Image (spheres, helix red, strand yellow):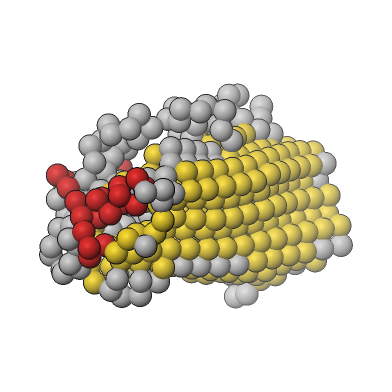
Amino acid sequence: MYDIRAYGAAGVAGELCTAAIQRAIDECAANGGGTVNFPAGTYLTGTVYLRDNVTLNLESGARLLGSSRREDYNADDFCPQNRVFVKERVTGAHLIVAVEANNIGITGQGVIDGNRQAFSDKTWEERPQLFEYPEWRPGQMIFFCECTNVTITDVKLYNSPYWTCFLHGCEDVVIAGVRIWNDQRTWNGDGIDIDCCARVTVTNCIIDSGDDCITLRGHIEPLKDQSRVCQHVTVSNCILRTRCNAFRIGVGSGEVRDCVISNCVIWDTRTAVCIISKYSEKSLGVKIENILFNNLHIEAMRPIIVSSNVRGCQPDETVKLIRNISFNHLRGRARWSSFVTGNPDCLVKDISFSDVWFEYSGGADAVPPEKAERSYGEFGVKCAPVAFYLLNADGVEFDRCRVSWRDPEPGWQAAIMAQNVSGLRLERCRLEAPPGGVECIQNGK
């Protein structure tokens, strides 16, 4: 074990120790690998680079604190896979980096703190629920790119100025027992972003984030290996809260497939599950298939979106297919409708709901289709006048599902509305009609 204090890092607040940390990592790697240990204390640092066979261990009381100075971080072009998202006013700087490294890890009971408050701590006057954009801020706090055998366990990841933990093109990853907290007023304050990664498990994590809690993405373009697919990912036994999406699946132009999400609690959240093929107008969209959701408890404004386009139904033939998505054993409460919507020439196919019971309230902000100036979607109209709105889909099934109402406001018309949907099946369902409405509307009837 390599004790960081032996390399000149005293753990005193305000004392920059980037060089000492890097010396310990490099010597550990040169000797075949091992553990670099951080005893209790505060270690102010800029970018540090993990090497093959090195694990960082933060003891209880240890805090790795991100510097507020740009010169303490990596350059934007330090590796060819790095990207700068100018639109989101973020640099390509990171706190902990590993590129094409093997057998790496972060463990322990300590804290990695991105020091978000040093970059932005004033709320925006026009939208007081968000902080102002800072003059500059680092990018993803943890950035592991095209690495293998990655372990992140038990640590606390706090106050990231941007995404917290970004895994891009990695394989054989274990994330367990991690606590992520990011003030919900933080722009783009994601929890864990899993992009073009294979064989990943995320278990027993608690995430409270300023943007998406967990994402499965297919942004293949920056990677050296263009054959990578986001696949064979499991997420289980997690508790999630965010002002955005608990789960976002999509983004990019690659593939996301063969994943299981189970035994999770989602609370005080805008959208529980957001599955969208085409997020950006510059993208061809992501092919998304064979995703299984089991045993979720949901308290959210909206339970589910499955859509070809982030703006809802669009006249776009290039978007990729979404198929074989299953939702089983879900319970929850909501105020906005769930959407299953495809484009006219690219249907969403084979979406099933089994043993699902949602209780709806709200309804005052529901907009009927004939009055909606924009399409229903994450970036469109938020609420249709029904619990489930289905459009341009094939093979949608509801089995043993229930919709009920709790103090609904005027605006609701039905439990389900289906337009241009083939193969709609309703088996053993209890679809309560809202006051003054009906159980189901198909093609206007």
- Residue 183 drawn above or below residue 99: below
The residue furthest right is 428
Frontmost residue, 27 versus 152: 27
- Residue 345 drawn above or below residue 61: above
Q: Quadrant of the N terminus?
A: bottom left
Look at the image and tell me whether residue 4 can be seen.
Answer: yes
Residue 240: horizontal and vertical position, in percent? 51, 65
- Left or right: residue 344 versus residue 23 is right
Residue appearing at x 22%, y 65% in the figure: 5
Residue appearing at x 41%, y 68% in the figure: 108
- Residue 357 drawn above or below residue 375: below
Residue 308: horizontal and vertical position, in percent? 59, 37
**Which image quarter: residue 405?**
bottom right
Frontmost residue, 349 versus 202: 202
Frontmost residue, 293 versus 337: 293
The residue furthest front is 31
Residue appearing at x 46%, y 67% in the figure: 154
Residue 371: horizontal and vertical position, in percent? 54, 45
**Which image quarter: residue 431?**
bottom right
Residue appearing at x 53%, y 63% in the figure: 176
Residue 80: horizontal and vertical position, in percent? 35, 29
Count of marks, rendered view: 0
Frontmost residue, 228 versus 324: 228
The residue furthest top is 317
- Left or right: residue 340 versus residue 187 is right
- Residue 383 drawn above or below residue 300: above
Look at the image and tell me whether residue 412 can be seen.
Answer: no
